[in-house]
Image (cartoon, helix red, strand yellow):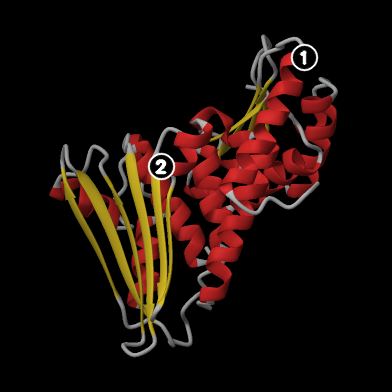
Amino acid sequence: MPTIKSLEDLKKMREEALRKQELKATTGKTEIIVGMGTVGIAAGARETLKAILEFVDNEHLENIIIRQTGNIGIDSFEPVVQVILPGQEKVTYGRVSTEIVKTIMEEHVVKGKIVEDYQVKS
Amino acid sequence: MREIALHILDIAANSISAGAKNISVRIAASSKDDTLDVSISDDGKGMTPEMIRMVTDPFTTSRTERNVGLGIPLLKAAAEACRGWFRIDSKPGKGTEVQARFQLSHIDRMPLGDLPDTFLGLLIGTPDVHWTFQVKKDELVFDFDDTELKNELGADSLSEPEVIRYVRMFFSEGIEPIAIN
């Protein structure tokens, strides 16, 4: 991966990436939501979000939308992460440490398999 | 919370919950005055004096609002414990500014913490908000306004790997030389 020096470089790289993407069929985007209320932040949600961003960057995942949201309402399970694959139901994961992020990203986001061990069922 | 940066993330989350479209985070350290000032201002729905009193007082809770503003008494206590002060200025319908001052050299002052990752999370995680960040120490200043980035790339593309990498590098290279502990 070349280092991007300026906004100009970034624009060029993106245009190239977009051209490549257009060749593939559009399959919709995967949404990843991190709960960032006070409880979530105190429980380490920033590190969780950071780990997700790093995974997306390192593995070069396309078609991902990362969002933060307020308190999801299950305080005792913070940090909470939700994954929505295109056209599928929202899956909620609890107590998502940076190690668990890796598992969820590899199994669910990349391969499409829900990681039941960390799932919070309502 | 162990870092001022985490408090900033928490207060900014309140601004997001308040429906703010523009949020500005400013951090200014002065060696001469021995002060560290933090300000988070927004154009969200604002608060009445009664609401401000409620969120500032840790012994008053309202069931329906317990998840918003939970961290405010913690930041207030942290600032006041470091020869500083804490203030909320807010008008319903106009917006809110939260300010905290710490004595820069105070032995009990928590570290500023990881600002690049905090700003990165806010910018990428809430693309619909217009963000401005400023970090200042004496003559050194880092200024960021996301307008140019979003005009060039579109807010939809912020979660793309190249963009994450670029923004992270931009924040690290801009903020680290300012070196506020």
Whether residue B154 is visible here, answered yes or no, is: yes
Q: Residues within 10 Å of mark 1 (few under 14, many from 20)?
A: few
Q: Which residue is at a point 25% across and 42% down the rendered structure image?
A: B43
Q: Give the left or right position of residue B172, taking residue A114 as reference.
A: left
Which residue was labeled with disc 1?
A: A23
Q: Observer-nearest residue: B118 or B106?
A: B118
Which residue was labeled with disc 2?
A: B147
Q: Which residue is at a point 73% across and 52% down the rendered structure image?
A: A3
Q: Which residue is at a point 71% across and 30% down the rendered structure image?
A: A16
Q: CA distance from mark 1 to mark 2?
A: 30 Å
Seen as rendered, the residue at the extreme bottom is B32
Q: Residues within 10 Å of mark 2 (few under 14, many from 20)?
A: few
**Mark 2 is on which residue type?**
Thr
The picture quadrant where one finds residue B15 is top left
In the rendered image, residue B16, in percent from the top left (x then y), is placed at: 38, 39
The picture quadrant where one finds residue B26 is bottom left
Q: Observer-nearest residue: A95 or B62?
A: A95
Q: Observer-nearest residue: A79 or B154?
A: B154
Badges 1 and 2: C-beta atoms under 8 Å apart?
no
Q: Which residue is at a point 55% across and 40% down the rendered structure image?
A: B124
Q: Give the left or right position of residue B113, taking residue A115 as reference.
A: left
In the rendered image, residue A96, in percent from the top left (x then y), is placed at: 71, 42
What SS does tag 2 mark?
A: helix
Relative to A73, residue A25 above or below: above
Q: Give the left or right position of residue B127, taking residue B17 as reference.
A: right
In the rendered image, residue B3, in percent from the top left (x then y), is placed at: 53, 67
Count how many numbered circles sit on residues in the image.
2
In the rendered image, residue A73, in percent from the top left (x then y), is placed at: 51, 33
**Mark 1 is on which residue type?**
Leu
Q: Chain of mark 1?
A: A
Relative to B148, residue B80 above or below: below
Whether residue B68 is visible here, answered yes or no, is: no
